[in-house]
Amino acid sequence: MKLDVQYFARYRETLGLDSESVVGAFTTIDDVRQALLQRGGVWAVLAEQNLMCARNQELCALDEPLGDGDEVAFFPTVTGG
Amino acid sequence: MVIRVQAVPFDPGTEVNALHAANLGIGAVVSFVGYVRDFNDGQDVAGLFLEHYPGMTEKALGKIAEEAEQRWPLLRLEIVHRIGGLEPGEPIVFVGVASAHRQAAFDACNFIMDYLKTRAPFWKKETGAQGPRWVEGRASDQAAQQRWEK
């Protein structure tokens, strides 16, 4: 499975990355997050409790199932308005 | 419904007048305008940068607007949100709702702001004497959104 993974705001800055292709066998968004956490160092930011995520540009929970080619995003709590 | 995500400034008065124009069935227009303040959490704010998630932002706002239209009998609805750099005193967000009677317009405007604050992918970064810093989400905003789920 190949995913387009995007990072925003403070996460984008901390990781020094706005998007990347990630290849692997993932069932849920949390599987992707766990794989990224394995990288260590700055990636620990994805362990924050107030992390939000989206699948194909819709907010979702960490147990959201994934399909090949999905766009996945991780970001901190939104602060618009 | 009208949804605009834009880098250029807007005039709230013009938006309110447009909401009422050419529809004599509208008896009430309620609007909310959010402005950039010059202080936050005890620190001076010299400017603000609004990051967003292109594509998702418009979808998220559209979904919030659709839900408001399902809950209340609305005649018009408009959301405008700035992105990019802003200075203190500038309007950052406009939500305007028109209906035949006031209660639907008051409630829908309130609902839209509560959902926009907690579900639309915008992030504020403040600049000031202490350097740049990302604004953190507030638990009170989450609680305000949750009350509509009951």
Image: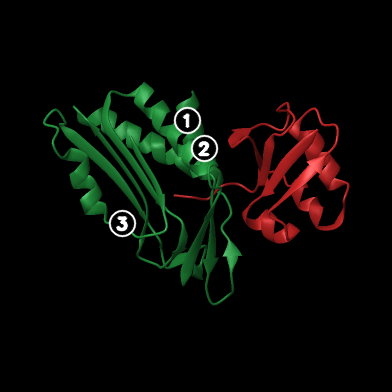
Q: Is residue B126 above or below residue A36?
A: below
Please name the amino acid that badge 2 sits on: Ala
The chain assigned the colour red in the figure is A
Q: Do discs 2 and 3 belong to a common subunit? A: yes
Left or right, residue B89 beside residue B28: right
Q: CA distance from mark 3 to mark 1?
A: 31 Å
Give residue B65's quadrant in the image.
top left
Q: Is residue B48 above or below residue A63?
A: below
- SS for callout 2: helix
For marks 2 and 3, the one nearer the N-term is 3
- Residue at the spot of label 3: B10
Instruction: Evaluate if marks 2 and 1 touch, with contact meaning CB atoms under 8 Å apart.
Output: yes
Circle 1: element type: helix
Query: How far apart in space, not on screen, are marks 2 and 1 (Cα)?
Result: 6 Å
Q: Is residue A37 left or right of residue B22?
A: right
Inspect the image, locate mark 1, and give the three-letter code of the amino acid beneath it. Answer: Arg
Q: Residue at x 47, y 30 (%)?
A: B147
Residue ID for mark 2? B143
Q: Nearer the viewer, residue B53 or B120?
A: B53
Give the percent coordinates (x, y) of residue B35: 37, 58
Identify the hue of chain B.
Answer: green
Q: Which residue is mark 1?
A: B147
> Residue B63: image x %, image y %?
46, 31
Residue B2, given in percent of the width and then of the height, sits at 33, 39
Which-is-in-front pick, marks 2 and 3? 3
* Residue farthest along the bottom direction in this orientation: B129
Residue B26 versus residue B143: which sits nearer the camera? B26
